Amino acid sequence: MSKTWVVLKHEFRTIVSKPSFWFGIIGLPIIIGAVIVVISLISGVATAAVATQRTSQSNLPHGFVDYAGIVRRADDGFERFAGEPEAERALRSGAIEAFYVIPADYMQTGQVRMVTKELDDSPLGPRRRVGAFQRMVNRNLLDDEALWTQLDRQVNITQSESVATVRTRTGPSFGGFSPLVYGVAVLFFTILITASAYLMQSVTTEKENRVIEILMSSVSPADLLAGKILGLSLVGLIQMVLWFGSAILALTRLPFLSEVIGPISPAAVLLTALFFVLSYFVYASLLAGLGALMPGSREAAQYTFLVSLPLFVPLYLNTAITAEPNGPLAVALSLIPFTSPLVMPMRLFGTSVPPLEVAISLALLAGLVYLAIQASARAFRAQALLSGSKPTLKQVIAAFFR
Amino acid sequence: MTTMHSATVSVSGLAKAFGQAQAVRDVSFDVHRGEIFGLLGPNGAGKTTTLRMILDIYKPDRGEINVLGGPMTEAKKARIGYLPEERGLYKDLRVEECVLYLAELKGLSRQEARRRADAFFERLGLAAEKRKKVSEFSKGMQQKVQIITALIHAPEVIIIDEPFSGLDPVNTRLVQDLLLEEHRKGTTIIMSTHQMHQVEEMCDRIVLIDKGASVLYGSVDEIRRQYADNAVRVTAHGELPHIPGVLETSRKGNTHTLSLPGDMDTQALLAQLATTPGLKIEAFELALPTMDDIFVRVVSGRRT
């Protein structure tokens, strides 16, 4: 254990002492923030005139017309109107910023119409409060046990109208989209891949620098692998805490963002951290094993994509997952251990997930952790570490599974 | 090749194959406490594989290894210093950090490692540059650092593979001096090398490995005597007289090599030369073959 501890300290110290690490860990959030500001500026939200108007508008309540009779108690910031003409008058007079029409067949269709003065899809426009409206609807639905089954239905606005023009747009559903869910997925993916790549680089660097044989004479491959995995998992956790921490800080300091994103469940944060640690062990172990088999980082990089391929699937299917976070696709991907590290946190931040599914997902992922470490330990052996030749794909597979 | 109780390292019937390639098939030897032991052999003979098995980096397929009184353990690794032939350092790390890490892996506390490292840096003229990155060091300076990493934990056994490979004469002397100093302290040294004059100068005993098997084993002096032809080397001023019975005479400067028949008495020959008028003898010795000659003779003999 003591040698594992020495390796752990060395790996941690080596990474955190690099300016490039801190540039990445601090610089990236700054760059992302800057990009958001720029996008906002480009979309016209931040121009001075509109900003003034927006500031005054942002304080305006939203209205709703409830033909379905769902909303018995309106939340703060929402005003009930008996019919659409009254709501439209209020909108034109500037008393409200927008209003929603809940049709009588909402329970069957889940569709709601949103009416605004002008078409405005920017995240800082009237749509920023769709999440709050959805929560009000859900909260009212919760009063009836029979409506539990409707809990996960998302407000599905398929049509936008403007009273200023006659333009109407229909398009793909965005009812389930949450910037938070997508943000979680991207952050998680980036941290996981970065931390795992650090580990593979650490192994290949020792091979390329030809220091590995000196290490082998002092520490067993198992202790070396354990020290590396644990040391670099700490690095990943720090990265995660800083990135997610700054995101949460931004949400608490920037109310308009919290309106767009909605509340964050502490349980979701904790479970996400747990998923991160477990999934890190999976990918880091596999990449470390890969690094052990390859003569250098260039050769290892050719195989990295294969190992990390499952993580791209949730990003590619993001729209489908966020549209139906409790649909068959999202549930399946959140249970499969290779994709669950991304999909389960997406679901946790986007909807309520049955505890049993979370438990099954964690159990399967823990099982994969065990198998990945076993496979990596098989590959992480002196003969492979001291070899200077590039193995074939068949040999790589054999090294992991023999 | 019996195992002696005083053996610091004992290897018996060692064999190791990698796939179809039999790297080591039958190697046995003992290394006595406090001696400098040479592991000799042509390229690909199995020397490095044997060293790696002694260090428990590779597990032997067959045979027995005892190190410091028993099988190798993780704890014993801290009592051994190793400098492999393919040696390197962390290029992006500061020199000091690199040495401290490798010393900590050998069981030193960070404070003790720093204290010892500073002493080595001072002695080898690296103190002013210890905070530089390894990549900023010249090859010679890096070699000094590598030697430090092998010695910093004051090992009882030093295993060093091709210690003089790629070194210039200055660094060769430096490494040689450091190893001889360790030898004087009582440290056991096992070195694998191709440089036979270093073997003659430094080693007490050797084993010669060829095609994965030990083919020659013993003290350097004994082996040279064993392989000596019946000849004497005479360094003298003046002309050598004609000596009846001498088979062949060759001369290089003032040194004459006389090949003798097996029954010729060398003491009588010395007496005859000593009484030859006008001949001043400076040296009279058995004409022992060099280790280089023996190496070539043994290995070539096995090839034919």
Image (spheres, coloured by chain):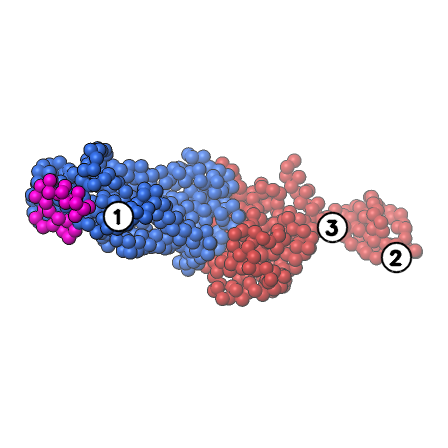
Chain colours: A blue, B red
Quarter of the rendering occupied by the C terminus of chain B: top right
Q: Give the residue pinned by disc 2.
A: B280
Label 2: chain letter: B
Badge 2 or badge 3: first in the primary sequence: 2
Circle 1: residue type: Gln
Magenta stretch: give its range: A71-97
Q: Give the residue pinned by disc 3.
A: B288
Circle 2: residue type: Lys
* SS label for mark 3: loop
Quarter of the image where one finds residue B203 = bottom right
Q: CA distance from mark 2 to mark 3?
A: 22 Å
Mark 2, residues whose alpha carbon is within 10 Å: few (<14), some, or many (≥20)?
A: some
* Disc ID at residue A53: 1
x, y percent for residue B226:
69, 49
Depth-wise, is mark 2 or mark 1 nearer the camera? 1
* SS label for mark 2: strand
Label 1: chain letter: A
x, y percent for residue A352:
19, 47
